[in-house]
Image (spheres, grey):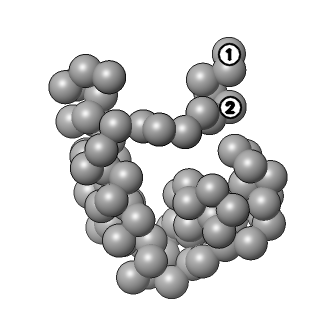
Amino acid sequence: MGENAITGRAAKAREIASSPDDFQVCEGCDSIVGAQVALCPNCHSYRFDSSPARVVSQALELGAREQRSVTAADLH
């Protein structure tokens, strides 16, 4: 993963952290998804943590490192 991809992840993390009420963290795979999602598109879990503190901490953690998980977009 190149520097541009990491920079993009950090920018997305800042965007999520600035509006945590719009997101939630999947308790199955730790992905961040929209607040309206009822089923995780990555692992199909239906359990989420929507607390702003959890969303912000997970966004900052994910934004500081390379992507490690396979998403639906990676399979196309």
Q: Nearer the viewer, residue 15 or 76?
A: 76
Locate residue 58 relative to residue 49 in the image: left or right. Answer: left
Amino acid type at mark 1: His
Location of residue 37 in the rendering, given as x and y in whole percent from the top left corner: 71, 60
Looking at the image, which residue sits at the far top? 76
Location of residue 64 in the rendering, given as x and y in whole percent from the top left corner: 25, 50
Asked if residue 15 can be seen in this view, the reply is no
Cβ atoms under marks 1 and 2 closer than 8 Å: yes
Location of residue 45 in the rendering, given as x and y in whole percent from the top left corner: 78, 60
Point 31% across, 50% down: residue = 63
Query: What residue does disc 2 label?
Result: 72
The image quarter in which residue 58 lies: bottom left
Label tally? 2
Q: Quadrant of the C terminus?
A: top right
Point 26% across, 57% down: residue = 14
Q: Quadrant of the N terminus?
A: top left
Locate residue 65 relative to residue 21 in the image: left or right. Answer: left
Q: Which mark is residue 14?
A: none
Asked if residue 24 can be seen in this view, the reply is yes
The image quarter in which residue 17 lies: bottom left
Looking at the image, which residue sits at the far front? 68
**What separation in Å lies between label 1 and label 2 (alpha carbons)?**
7 Å
Amino acid type at mark 2: Ala
As displayed, is residue 72 above or below residue 61? above
Q: Nearer the viewer, residue 15 or 69?
A: 69
Point 63% across, 64% down: residue = 26
Q: Nearer the viewer, residue 25 or 17?
A: 25
Secondary-structure class at tag 2? helix
The image quarter in which residue 72 lies: top right
Locate residue 39 relative to residue 75 in the image: left or right. Answer: right
Query: What residue does disc 1 label?
Result: 76
Secondary-structure class at tag 1? loop
